[in-house]
Image (spheres, grey):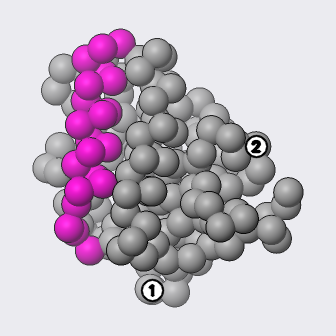
Amino acid sequence: MSATDMIVRDALPEDRAAVQDLTRRSYAQYATIMNLATWDGLRGAMESALASTEKAHRIVVERDGTIVGSVLLFAPATDAYGGIAQRVGWPQVRMLAVDPTARGLGVGQLLVEECVRRAHADGATAIGLHTSISMATAMRLYTRMGFVRVPEFDFQPEGGCELVEAYRLEL
């Protein structure tokens, strides 16, 4: 299966339950990697992002009629993190999720490339995201794509042990 066998599109209202399920399954691995407080914080942030009504592009990747990836791209200066992170002047990638059965197929990269394309089309000069040390595979993808650390936008969730690290890509 190649990237040409996948469709990147806007999520539809009827995709909501599938995206929520996919995101929860995708992030479940962190329950065994992170300490309990950090996992509880991430799980809460995930549920908050999934329920967010903030302005955002909601993007999915479909393969053979099944959603295998999703991501949110929040507009610049949006409260993408529910008040726990500093607002920034560039779009924010949030809750990148890839179905565990579709990992290694380039779904994550397709989603990030689509976020970059949309941010650029919206007139942005940069795009950002946050991640943590437990998300090593995602961190490798982001740095390979040219994202660089911007530690002045890092944050430490209350009760969490992992620093949430900020990255930005100039467009």
Closer to the camera, 121 or 19? 19
At mark 1, the secondary structure is loop
Question: Going by the image, does 54 lie left or right of 134?
Answer: left
Q: Give the Cα distance between marks 1 and 2.
A: 31 Å
Q: Mark 1 or mark 2: which is in front?
A: 2
Question: Going by the image, does 149 lie left or right of 89?
Answer: right
Position of 52 relative to 155 (above/below): below
Residue in the image at 26% along x and 25% along y: 40
Residue in the image at 67% along x and 55% along y: 107
Residue furthest to the right in view is 1
Query: In the rendered image, which quarter contains the N terminus?
Result: bottom right
Position of 104 relative to 146 (above/below): above
Closer to the camera, 22 or 45? 22
Magenta region, mostly helix, strand or loop? Answer: helix
- Mark 1 closeness class: few <14, some 14–19, many ≥20 residues within 10 Å: few
Badges 1 and 2: C-beta atoms under 8 Å apart?
Answer: no
Location of mark 2 (residue): 104
Q: In this rendering, does residue 93 appear at all?
A: no
Q: Quadrant of residue 161?
A: top left
Residue 116 at x, y = what percent? 56, 70
User: Over which residues does the magenta segment extend?
Assistant: 35-55
Type of amino acid under label 2 = Gly
Location of mark 1 (residue): 123
Type of amino acid under label 1 = Gly
Q: Quadrant of residue 13?
A: bottom left
- Mark 2 closeness class: few <14, some 14–19, many ≥20 residues within 10 Å: few
At mark 2, the secondary structure is loop
| Lower position in the chain sequence, tag 1 or tag 2 | 2
Residue 79 at x, y = what percent? 20, 60
Residue in the image at 14% along x and 50% along y: 83
Residue 83 highlighted magenta (yes or no): no
